[in-house]
Amino acid sequence: MSERIERIGSTVIENVRPQLDAGRWPVKRVEGESLTVQADIFKEGHDVLVAVVRWRQSVPRSQATEWAEVPMSSPKGNDLWEGSFPLTSNGRYEYTVEAWPDFFATWVTEIKRKVDVGRDVRSELLEGAAMLRAHAERARQDGNPDDAERMLKAATLFDQGMSPNAIAAAVDPELKRVASRYADRSVATRYDRVLEVFVDREKARYGSWYEFFPRSAPRDGRTHGTFKDAEKWLPYVQSLGFDVIYLPPVHPIGLKARKGKNNSLTAGPDDVGSPWAIGGPEGGHKAIHPQLGTLEDFARFVKEANAQGIEIAMDLAYQCSPDHPYVKEHPEWFLHRPDGTIKTAENPPKRYEDIVNFDWLGPARDTLWPELKSVVMHWVNLGVRIFRVDNPHTKPMQFWAWMIREVQTERPDIIFLAEAFTRPKVMKALAKLGFGQSYSYFTWRNFKAEMQEYLEELTQPPVSDYMRANFWPNTPDILPEFLQRSGPGGFRLRAAMAATLSSVWGMYCGYELCEGTPVAPGKEEYLDSEKYELKAWDLDRPGNIRDYIARLNGIRQRHRAFQLYDNLRFHPSENEQVMFYSKRTPDGTSQVLVAVSFDPYNAQDSVLYVPLEELGIQPDETYQVHELMTDTRSLWQGPTAQVRLTPEQPAAIWAIYRFRRSEQAFDYYE
Ligand SMILES: O=P(O)(O)O[C@H]1O[C@H](CO)[C@@H](O[C@H]2O[C@H](CO)[C@@H](O)[C@H](O)[C@H]2O)[C@H](O)[C@H]1O
């Protein structure tokens, strides 16, 4: 028989899920969750089947465990089986499925039927006795003599022929349970793949990001900031409720081909250059820009931020200014033109004249790749645990797959965010191969139907099994057209959407000030972009929406439903300008409803259809809602509610409280 046919086994295990691309990549979960594994399992005939999920933790190696098993069940009896195992800690786990026929249990089922219709079962009892002796032998070998004894006693009784005692023993559920432990697993089928799940720490799923340029920290637009200046921003960022600070590159910046203000190709003597043009005489990817400080200053900044409950996400831009030490020391790492010059980089239609690219798959990759991994580990050793990876889609997939797996095998707590705005399949492939978070098209979804359709795709399996979209209403590269015309109402509503639709969101400094002037009509770049100059940020600027942002983040912190990613459900709202959705924790202890307007200019009214059944509310039940943006409470009853949203309050966020009858009185719970 061919190996292929052999592998089917007598018990068939098919359609094991979750699994990604035939098991090529791990699915993703977060520590504290469990993984529910499902499979279609069946066998010819009517044998009773037993199935288990086999699992073990494989990374970190210091916590690797032996294979363990959890039972699977098929509650509906339709050959669909499932079982769950706990993902208690950050790392990589393996799992597979095994199933086998339990012949003794089958025998019990059959003998019951025969006895019920008065058949002579003497011969069947002898078969049962033989089976129990084989089971007893396995029990003895496993070191369980008591179980062996119990089965042998029943076998002796069966040998003595048909008696009320023998029949009673044959159908005794306890005997069946004991025997089942020693079923003959040499006939088991094991699913022919070992699958993986990568279990991130919670920060991969829930976080509120704030981006700022530390070199602008003094806020006068003239003085180059240091990490010590940036430390002074920590209380500000904290007051807005953010818990991750993402810093654009903090390395020395090249002089050759340095860009000037507003992306000009000629820089003046005082121009600071784009921080993504990494590398100068002072060092490259492992060095700190001398005007920002020293490595020690950086490490201190990270420590101070951590002490204030904020993690630092570092930019990982694998590219070099022509002045980078690598260019001189390792010319073999770069892509050269036929005339011998090194090629400059681009992300069409954008051109990056101040940087050059590595020759990713060239003959020197065996030294290049380990060096690039060592860049990550260098910063990890200084306390960084999150990396925002610049333009990963312009580098080969196999490099990322290798690099992320290598890093996370040593340090599973490291999280990588893919800054890839490109074709959907490419973005998904990056997520599959290991990026724990991804940028998304949220930034450009301006209408209800397209937003709902996109979110439904992102937050449901199979995509939610491997991709977590981090929603950014702006970045230093992107001032969306919508915000250029919307006024503060638009800034409020886009922030409310980002912060309540996804459990991970972020914004770039200036958003809270409603900064919305483009470099030119029809362009998405900011005028006087901070990418090329120091900025004088007046954080108290009139018309700012700091309180609004802080309130949104505070709600996210207090209401756990917002901290989960795949729990978003849309519900009908009669007005096309108003989107209505809910989020709840699986145990129902946190449940929220959100209505948000797409109109930054006018008030919008809508009738909302409350998903009473999903929220566990009876049709005639009165429940309390607490609108969290305005801190107002109301009593609702029935399947509809009315909302008015305005540019000042474009989102309503309700926590739901149900009345519970206690012995003394009614009290309510979330
Ligand atoms: O290409 P993306 O739109 O994904 O943008 C990211 O990568 C760019 C290249 O690193 C980066 O561009 C900035 O740095 C370049 C190199 O110094 C410079 O030539 C560009 O003008 C500047 O915008 C961009 O900021 C980053 O988000």
Image (cartoon, rainbow, N blue to C red):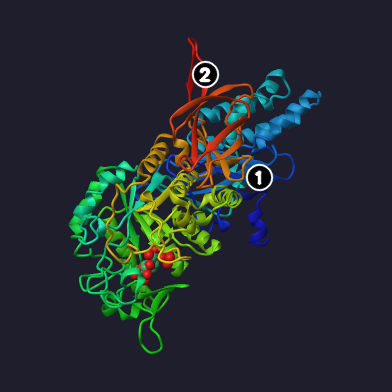
The answer to whether 245 appears left or right of 75 in the picture is: left
User: Residue 149 at x, y = what percent?
Assistant: 55, 27
The answer to whether 547 appears left or right of 643 in the picture is: left
Taking the view exactly as shown, the residue that stands out farthest to the top is: 664
For the residues labelled 2 and 1, the Cα–Cα distance comes to 42 Å
Nearer-the-camera pick, 103 or 596: 596
User: Looking at the rendering, in which quadrant would you find the N terminus?
Assistant: bottom right
Residue 620 sits in quarter: top right
Please tell me the numbered disc located at residue 41.
Answer: 1
Please tell me the numbered disc located at residue 660.
Answer: 2
Tell me what residue is drawn at x 24 percent, y 68 percent: 252
Q: Is residue 101 above or below residue 61?
A: above
Q: Tell me the kind of residue under disc 2.
A: Arg
Does residue 73 appear anywhere in the picture?
Answer: yes
**Crowding at mark 1 (Cα within 10 Å: few <14, some 14-19, many 20+):** many
Q: Tell me the kind of residue under disc 1.
A: Ile
